[in-house]
Amino acid sequence: MRDRPGGVTERNVARALADGWGLSAASLRYAPVGGGSYHWIAADDRGRQWFVTVDDLDDKGWLGRTRAGVLAGLRAAMDAAVTLRRDASLGFVVAPIPARDGNPVHPLGTQDAGQDAGPVRPPGGGRYAVAVFPFLPGEPGRWDEPLPAPERAELVAILAALHRVDPAAVRLPRMGLGLSWRGDLEQALADLGRPWTGGPFAEPARALLAAAAGPVRRELDALDRQAAALAAREPVITHGEPHPANVIHGDNGALMLIDWDTVALAPPERDLWMVATETGDEQRLYTEITGRPVDHTLLETYRLRWALDDISCFVRDLRAPHRRTPGTEHAYDALDLSVAQLIP
């Protein structure tokens, strides 16, 4: 995330680490990387490091519609990651470090709890939550740079191992084809005939969506038609976003999967479309490992769903009040790319 979360300071994060995990952060460095969460690198006075994430509970629509619901969903996802690494022995899972009370995610307060400061209160009625992960010194891949063939094969084997775990081992919802912010996208389509006034990228975003309104509506209808067929498929545990930016090399050189907030029960194709290439090598390897055939139509359905979901997220952000920042510039550029995927 290129922009920092409003109202959250290093002091807030340090207090959360001390109160929740008993960690004394001698230094905190904001890391403007990735998407979906805000990140800091924490270090103590011995040089030990941790990777700290702060999540905006108003911005994770796939987990729920209320802050309490999103927090519960985030905790369930992080609990699942801990279970997969600890109990299912999946060493490629980069799971959070549970806090002293056993929870992997804690609300983030914005006041220091000194003698006269009063209770620590989460900002905005509990808008943010914090989690702590082991620090990995490597660099993740880039979304727009496909993995080399050997690493794609390794990732296919990783996904096959994940998909073989009994879904009953975790408490996760079954994920359909719904978009994170379908209602917001529908409202934006209905409002194309009037100005958008949220900020400098509002009107340019309206122009982008207006140019693609027909294809967007057709693809939304196509997604709805696939929902019934999806419900008939047997689900597995899926990561949800095994793209190159969520892959990193561990200490032994093996691939590791990060960012488990999208973990859910779904057909394997929810993961496989991100590693499948036109050669079909990845699909054949997956079937060879698991004995499970790959549904190519469903691969394309998930590819479509990703583009529409991105559009719903970026349109929502750019219709809301905003300023020109690196984050909103990125959102507009990403919306442009997502819309282009749907225009013939």
Image: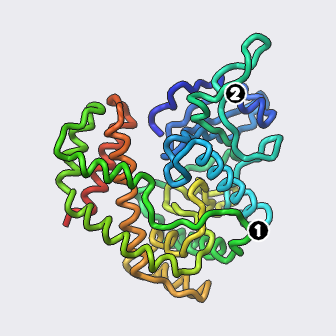
- Residue 6 x/y as whole percent: 50, 27
**CB atoms of marks 2 and 1 within 8 Å:** no
User: Label 2 sits on what residue type?
Assistant: Ala
Residue found at x 24% / y 50%: 190
Q: How many marks?
A: 2
Query: Up-down: is 208 above or below 7?
Result: below
Packing grade of label 2 (10 A; few <14, some 14-19, many >=20) is some
Separation of marks 2 and 1 at Cα, in angstroms: 32 Å
> Residue tagged by mark 2?
14
Residue 335 in the image: x percent, y percent?
A: 31, 49
Three-letter amino acid code at disc 1?
Ala
Left or right? Give the position of 326 relative to 27.
left
How was the colour assigned to the protein in this rendering?
Answer: rainbow
Q: Nearer the viewer, residue 160 or 200?
A: 200
Please name the residue that numbered disc 1 is placed on: 88
Question: Between disc 2 and disc 1, whose residue precedes?
Answer: 2
> Relative to residue 244, is residue 327 drawn left or right?
left
* Point 69% across, 46% down: residue: 133
Residue 215 x, y percent position in the rendering: 23, 64
Question: Which of the numbered marks, if any, corresponds to residue 328?
Answer: none
Q: Quadrant of the C terminus?
A: bottom left
Residue that appears at 54% across and 52% down: 140
Left or right: where does residue 95 sit relative to residue 324? right
Where residue 303 sits, quadrant-wise, is bottom left
Secondary element under disc 1, as helix, strand or loop, is loop
Q: Is residue 32 above or below residue 176?
A: above
Q: Position of residue 222 (x, y in %)?
A: 32, 72
Residue at (59%, 31%) from the top-left corner?
Answer: 125
